[in-house]
Image (cartoon, helix red, strand yellow):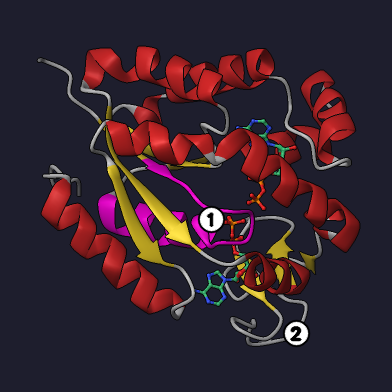
Amino acid sequence: MSDVRTYLVLLGVPGAGKGTQAKLLQETLGLPQVSTGDIFRYNLKNATELGVLAKSYMDKGLLVPDEVTIRMVEDRLAQPDCAAGAIMDGFPRTLQQAAAFDALTAPHGGVRLAPLIGLSDEEAVLRISGRRSCRTCGAIYHAVANPPRVEGVCDKDGGELYQRDDDREEVVRNRLFVYYKQTAPLIGYYFAKGLLVELDGAQPISDVFAGLQAALAAHAALPTHS
Ligand code: ADP
Ligand code: ADP
């Protein structure tokens, strides 16, 4: 195969730590994090047609329709920074998205590994209620577990930290429900392909990351990117 790329799919309940780990992996692997949630939020901030559409679903904790989401990911993966592959964070989230992603990545060797970051619902709700995100660079903090040096201010770029609209408790419950109904079947999907590795997401961030790196070394035969 001439154009083999590295596609990783991070799985886990909302709040499990996918975004946090994707950002760490991005630095070590030299591959971009592709977060569909971040792309929707970017569109929302810029009041694009896609952003307005996505908001009506995100506010309720529902998934944006597959057709729209898949097209958006196709466009994103065609960008030059994704030429060697990508770390998928929050996509695929339905079996239909997973099948579309397989078709899209098949010419490049398909999905390399699907790490599942395991976390209980109670722990996930606690994490989400303390999550704070940087308005400008998207860095992720936690009020207690991973606080910034100065409260309300991003360590990386000094941006303002905020709580996402959909991180309110009543929306979070619905997102968990949607996860079990629509996204959890992907665990079986990737297990059947021999691509699933399970990690204990209740450990400290650095331990989860070490586990992830060990899993990649053991199962994924990653090319070295600079
Ligand atoms: P979290 O990191 O807490 O799981 P995300 O930022 O990934 O949350 O997603 C926030 C919201 O964006 C979702 O509740 C959903 O409305 C929308 N969204 C993100 N990714 C997808 C996707 N792959 N398919 C459909 N909707 C999505
Ligand atoms: P996801 O992308 O899966 O929704 P995030 O990476 O946004 O999850 O993490 C959710 C919240 O939990 C954030 O506030 C983050 O700082 C915090 N967090 C992530 N990983 C850990 C961990 N291993 N231990 C404690 N807190 C964590």
**Residue 134 visible in the snapshot:** yes
Whether residue 167 is situated above or below residue 5 in the rendered picture: below
**Residue 46 visible in the snapshot:** no
Q: Identify the residue at horizontal 12%, vertical 55% (top origin).
A: 218
Q: Identify the residue at horizontal 72%, vertical 67% (top origin).
A: 125
Is residue 24 in the magenta section? yes
Q: Identify the residue at horizontal 45%, vertical 81% (top origin).
A: 204
Residue type highlighted by circle 2: Glu
Q: Is residue 3 left or right of residue 26?
A: left
Q: Position of residue 72 (x, y in %)?
A: 60, 20
> Where residue 56 is drawn, which disc sits there?
none
Disc 1 under 8 Å from ligand 2? The reply is: yes
Q: Which residue is mark 1?
A: 19
Whether residue 152 is situated above or below residue 78 in the rendered picture: below
Q: Position of residue 224 (x, y in %)?
A: 13, 47
Q: Which residue is mark 2?
A: 151
Q: Say how many tags the image has.
A: 2
Q: Is residue 179 left or right of residue 111?
A: right
